[in-house]
Amino acid sequence: MSLEASIRLALGPLDLDMELTIDEGEVVALLGPNGAGKTTLLRAMAGLVPFNSGHVRLDGKVLEDTATGQYVPTERRPIGFVFQDYLLFPHLSVLDNVAFGLRSRGTSRGAAAQKAVEWLGRVGLEDYARAKPAELSGGQRQRVALARALAPDPRLLLLDEPLAALDVSTRAEVRRDLKRHLASFQGIRLVVTHDPLEAVALADRLIVMENGRLVQTGTPAEVTEHPRSQYVADLVGVNLIRGEADHGTVRIPGGTAVAAAGAESGEVFAMIHPRAIAIYRRRPEGSPRNVWSGRASNIELLGNRVRVRIDGEVPLVAEVTPAALKELDLVEGGEVWVSFKATDVGVYPA
Amino acid sequence: MRRERVPIVVVVPAAIGAAFFILPLVGLVVRSPWRDAVTALTAPETIEALKLSLVASLSATGIGLILGVPLAWVYARVEFPGRDLLRALTTLPMVLPPVVGGIALLLAFGRRGLFGSWLDTTFGITLPFTTAGVVMAETFVAMPFLILTVEAGLRSMDRRYEEAARALGASRWRVFTRVTLPLIGPSLFAGAVLCWARALGEFGATITFAGNFPGVTQTMPLAVYLLLETNQEASFILSLVLLLISLLFLVVLRHRWLGSA
């Protein structure tokens, strides 16, 4: 049982070309920056956005296929959709919102109400059945939206930025609840998010997309340990360089060679953790093979660490302690030297 | 609390503007022969005219809802060539002198009219100078208000609610009745009231297309105008009745629509 989609579409500036397969039993997060086409992809799978070519198959049944002209309208797809700002019907009570999908699919009024009450109990909102959505807090609305999507027993659950509308104080708690509900749902689960923390917390597998294309997929550990795009590297907070490996060095476009133990041959990514990069005011002499000069373009305090962005031959981010920064007497725009050891460079095929 | 002084160049024309509306109403209330009110109001012609006015204006509103809401939906949701032109044509009666509207109706649906003669010979249906003709004239003039208001409501509503409903398995009809209509409720209500008020006051198109037969086509505005010649006091009283009805609905509107805006 799985979802299999291959979708190509052009919509305004977006040029989307994605293929993905999601198996039952895994929670997949679609991660990417704003404008990457995540929401459009989700909407296309729900039948809300027409696509130029491709297909969507659920459990082997065709929902849409441009090659054969098959199209199952949204209302007849076995999907549950949690929209970004939930879109609870403002004129209906919480109970009627949750019962809406059941009633739409032909369940009798009594049975639908009974099942809706059951679902409200499951999300801990049985006391709010008569309330209107406007009377609920953000977290409660999220739970109603989830109950509403799940009540008709869909095969495929699509969640679009389910936590983005919440303030930071409630997000952690709602995320825990959401994880629990996702775990108990017997179907295919796909969560769209731009928040890496959310993706890692909720999903067994990440699909990273940028500019309408898939850039990386894997478990959260695989993705964070071996970023394959600048976007993911920035999310994880590491330096990522792409270049040509040549027995101990990685040559990057522009000609600079980075000494990297383990570099063999071919296109590779070289990853350097900011903690592994040391900053000096004068040219250091010592064992590290990688020594460059540059200019500190941005200094940012993050908790008990300071991240210093250094522009130079190879733009890098280094992480030092506030005390070290003070000792260096470094200000933005100041000249610095950076160095790191060849053994601190992680190399993996591109 | 310190209050901002309102400039005199604004206050004076504003006051004159307000007085311009208030003085005629004061005149109507003060000079109406209140002593004869009961007699005038219970006169059979008055009751007939009032009944006809209410029946015809409510019918016009009903037809407006049945035909106008789908038309507004088409304008708001369907892209087709000539849509703007069609919208302009169906809005025209709002700016057209009602008498011209009445003549146009006569030329189209009169007994010798373009379609009227066909209706007459084929079905034996005659529309002009009947109560149905009154309803037609009123609908012609009043429905555009409803169409425009409902279209604006449809355009400004968040369509994603309709998508949410579809994703929950709702058919097009269920989406429309359970989500779209309730969400545009305020516009629907406002459009219906505007349409009804315009229909209630309709004079020019009605008298041209339907004539002035007491009990059949003589609505309140027609009765008021004709009584002015024969029985001034009674026409004042009827005017007062129309004023009260309008005022009543304005108050209702304020609560339901203007108040929340």
Image (cartoon, rainbow, N blue to C red):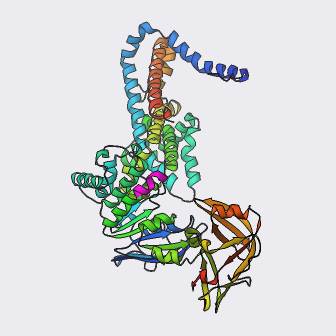
Q: At 48% across and 78% down in the image, what residue appears?
A: A222
The image quarter in which residue A143 lies: bottom left
The image quarter in which residue B164 lies: bottom left
How many numbered marks have been drawn onto this rendered protein structure? Answer: 0
Residue B89 against residue B99 in the figure, above or below: below
Which quadrant holds the C terminus of chain A?
bottom right
Give the left or right position of residue A239, taking residue A313 as reference: left
Residue A308 against residue A341 in the figure, above or below: above
Q: At 61% across and 89% down in the image, what residue appears?
A: A263
Q: Is residue B121 magenta?
A: no
Residue B152 against residue A61 in the figure, above or below: above
Residue B206, x across and y down, in percent: 48, 32
Depth check: give the residue in front, A90 or B255. A90
Give the left or right position of residue B239, taking residue B39 as reference: right
Residue A303, x across and y down, in percent: 57, 59
Residue A128 against residue A143 in the figure, above or below: above
Residue B57, x across and y down, in percent: 42, 33
Q: Is residue A46 visible?
A: no
Q: Is residue A172 magenta?
A: yes
Q: Which residues are magenta?
A: A165-174
Residue B25, x across and y down, in percent: 54, 17
Depth check: give the residue in front, A162 or B78. A162
- Residue farthest to the top? B35
User: What main secondary structure does the magenta stretch of the protein show?
Assistant: helix
Q: At 42% across and 63% down in the image, what residue appears?
A: A159
